[in-house]
Image (cartoon, grey):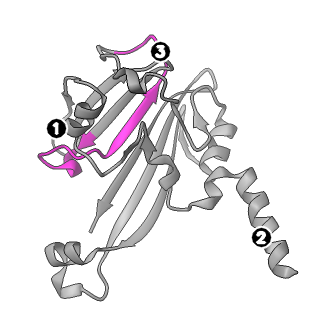
Amino acid sequence: MKYLIRFFLMLFCHLLHPAYADETGSQFTSIADIELGTLTLEQVADKLGHSKMQFSGEGGESQEVICYRTNDGYLSFLSGEMGGPKHTLLGFGISGKGKHQDCPEITPKFANVKLRLAGLHLGMSKNEFERAIGKKAKWDGVVGRASFQTRVPMTPDQIKRFSPEHKDDAFFDLSVSIVGKFSGGKLAAFEVWKVESL
């Protein structure tokens, strides 16, 4: 009986807080059938249509971006210094219509992609934002930030490449970060980043 009660409590918590089911933040790391960390920006463009890569910043602040117009708004794919010379996909951004630089239309197959992630979407209030991510955000004015930190065991191939001397205790630190920008009390844009480090 106590297991049945525990099951219903977990189900109830999951319904109240969508992020409850996954404390790693992985429910926020995929959109348009693309998972962060699995492709390069060039491979994203092969799948979603040509988009000129834009560069900004220097060194640790550098960022590479390709972006697309969809029926719901703008979808950007992001890399940075940790993405290396091949520009591994580390993040994506979502923003509303009518305020962006030159972004080509996404390939028709994905034109109706929903710019939503596990309950996170444009137009929500700050309270709704925190409920969707399942934790309190850190606020700096109109910008809210939250992150999920996890240790992930390396695969045997990764151990050979990165940590052969620590084969019994070889892990990556995995960080999933969400940054929301608000205007008039409503979520106007947000980014999700996923970074693995030793």
Q: Secondary structure at mark 1?
A: loop
Can you name the residue that lies furthest to the top here? 98
Q: Quadrant of residue 168?
A: bottom left
CA separation, marks 2 and 3?
A: 42 Å
Q: CA distance from mark 2 to mark 1?
A: 50 Å
Disc number at residue 97?
A: 3
Quick one: which residue is furthest to the left in this view? 85
Do tag 1 and tag 3 residues touch (Cβ < 8 Å)?
no
Earlier in the chain: of badge 2 and badge 3, it is 2
Near-viewer residue (18 or 142) = 18
Magenta residue span: 79-100
* 148 up-or-down from 182: above or below: below
Amino acid on which disc 1 is placed: Glu
**Identity of the residue drawn at 26% across and 69% down:** 198
Secondary structure of the residue carrying numbered label 2: helix
Q: Secondary structure at mark 3?
A: loop
Count residues near mark 3 (Cα–Cα under 10 Å), then give few for <14, some for 14-19, many for 20+: few
Disc ID at residue 7? 2
